Image: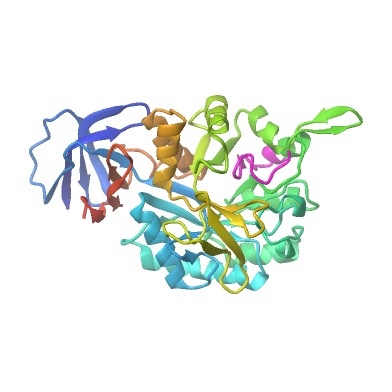
């Protein structure tokens, strides 16, 4: 199958250029510039009529969308959430399992394995689960139910690792907990990315965890320690550590609510687009017009309120999660923060792909990579999507 996508504005790593892409089966065969395309016996021609052609978005942290949460424990919920994200340009997803009972966590692993098979060829690529807990700091629980937060114990996490072998890509943990250092080492041995989050760690603890392989920070600024005084001396927290360790990567919830515009700009300027991934950290009501929802599973989740374009705890004491999809993040970063489009897209594509070791296959319009492509207009309204060479929506259908 040979497909020509032409009359497009290609979003590259450092520029936007008019050009075309030739897709052969599931792979990008040729990337060219200008109006003149190679004359080949194409099976399909797609005229984008001047629209942007971008790599598909790579989402490292989402709890759900379209009325479904990945903790609901059903294949249907996985499908609903993933297909909703695909409609908004996300072609690679790390579904996130929240801190919960042992049984619910095992069930989420089961559902992921089934969904990966079912969605292959018709939905987003499911690289692996992101486990957000349960080994977190209760003082930084955020919207996570503290009843399900605990210290890492080998007896339990070895069960998870064995049961989820090949299905877990990333694990958020509080690195200051007893047993966390050994747990982080085990994660790296299993090829899983340890990520610092929901943590009260100080710089020395974060630095030690970084050396053990915890090279990423979960939703920077949210649910983490910052500067504290002890005996008059200031001590840096997770937040400052992320800035002070140049090689450390971070993710930011760029919905325009979790962080004010000036902090989004600060993170972009200090860390740079090659160290910052955008994430929606969305819950089940992303892509819906509702006033109330549930964070976590339907049976054990927490009721939340939707107002001011964000989810809040019912007492309005804190945010409960994002209602954003990834196209909104690009709009916020370009239209409100003023980031160049190619940088904003990089933070939603190539950078997250690099963080999870997928950049040899995903994340950029490059010959030899998977044909994960999306099209959108000047307002980042998604008009089409293609996953591994198969068009699914709108213009690319």
Q: How many marks?
A: 0
Q: Residue furthest right?
A: 231
From the image, give the main secondary structure of the stretch colored magenta.
loop
Up/down of 294 relative to 381, above or below: below
Q: Nearer the viewer, residue 32 or 302?
A: 302
Coloration mode: rainbow
Residue at point 33%, 26% (across, down): 15
Q: Residue at x 77, y 51 (%)?
A: 139
Q: Is residue 113 left or right of residue 218?
A: left
Asked if residue 121 is among those painted magenta in the image, a careful observer would answer: no
Q: Is residue 188 above or below residue 66?
A: above
> Residue 186, image x and y in percent?
67, 53
Q: Position of residue 84 (x, y in %)?
A: 38, 59
Residue 221 shown in magenta = yes
Residue 129 in view, yes or no: no
Q: What span is in magenta? A: 209-225
Q: Give x and y (percent) for residue 43.
A: 11, 51
Is residue 327 at all visible to an observer of this figure?
yes
Q: Nearer the viewer, residue 85 or 388?
A: 85
Q: Residue at x 53, y 64 (%)?
A: 293
Q: Quadrant of residue 225?
A: top right
**Against 343, is 133 above or below?**
below
Relative to 19, say whether 292 is above or below: below
Q: Image quadrant for the C terminus?
A: bottom left
Side (left or right) of 194 relative to 325: right
Question: Residue 146 location in percent, x, y?
Answer: 73, 60
In this image, 166 relative to 11: left or right?
A: right
């Amino acid at each position: 199958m040979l497909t020509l996508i032409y009359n497009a504005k290609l979003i590259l790593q450092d520029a936007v250029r008019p050009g075309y892409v030739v897709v052969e089966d599931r792979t990008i065969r040729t990337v060219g510039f200008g109006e003149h395309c190679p004359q080949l016996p194409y099976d399909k021609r797609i005229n984008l009529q001047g629209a942007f052609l971008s790599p598909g978005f790579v989402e490292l942290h989402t709890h759900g969308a379209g009325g479904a949460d990945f903790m609901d424990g059903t294949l249907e919920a996985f499908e609903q959430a993933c297909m909703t994200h695909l409609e908004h340009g996300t072609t690679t997803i790390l579904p996130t399992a929240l801190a919960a009972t042992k049984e619910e966590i095992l069930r989420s692993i089961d559902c992921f394995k089934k969904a990966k098979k079912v969605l292959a060829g018709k939905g987003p690529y499911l690289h692996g689960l992101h486990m957000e807990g349960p080994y977190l700091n209760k003082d930084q629980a955020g919207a996570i139910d503290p009843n399900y937060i605990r210290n890492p114990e080998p007896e339990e996490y070895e069960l998870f690792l064995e049961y989820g072998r090949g299905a877990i890509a990333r694990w958020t943990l509080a690195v200051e907990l007893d047993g966390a250092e050994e747990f982080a080492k085990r994660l790296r041995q299993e090829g899983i990315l340890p990520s610092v989050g929901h943590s009260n760690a100080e710089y020395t603890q974060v630095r030690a965890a970084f050396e053990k392989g915890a090279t990423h920070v979960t939703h920077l600024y949210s649910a983490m320690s910052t500067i504290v005084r002890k005996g008059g001396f200031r001590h840096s927290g997770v937040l400052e550590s992320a800035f002070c360790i140049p090689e450390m990567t971070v993710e930011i919830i760029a919905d325009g609510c979790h962080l004010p515009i000036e902090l989004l700009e600060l993170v972009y300027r200090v860390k740079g687009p090659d160290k910052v991934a955008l994430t929606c950290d969305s819950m089940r009501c992303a892509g819906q017009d509702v006033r109330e929802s549930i964070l976590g599973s339907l049976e054990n989740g927490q009721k939340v309120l939707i107002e001011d374009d964000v989810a809040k705890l019912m007492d309005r004491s804190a945010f409960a999660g994002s209602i954003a999809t990834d196209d909104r993040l690009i709009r916020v970063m370009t239209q409100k923060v003023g980031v160049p489009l190619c940088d904003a897209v990089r933070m939603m594509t190539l950078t997250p792909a690099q963080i999870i070791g997928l950049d040899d296959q995903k994340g950029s319009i490059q010959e030899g990579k998977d044909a994960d492509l999306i099209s959108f207009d000047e307002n980042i309204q998604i008009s089409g999507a293609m996953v591994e060479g198969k068009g699914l929506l709108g213009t690319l259908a």
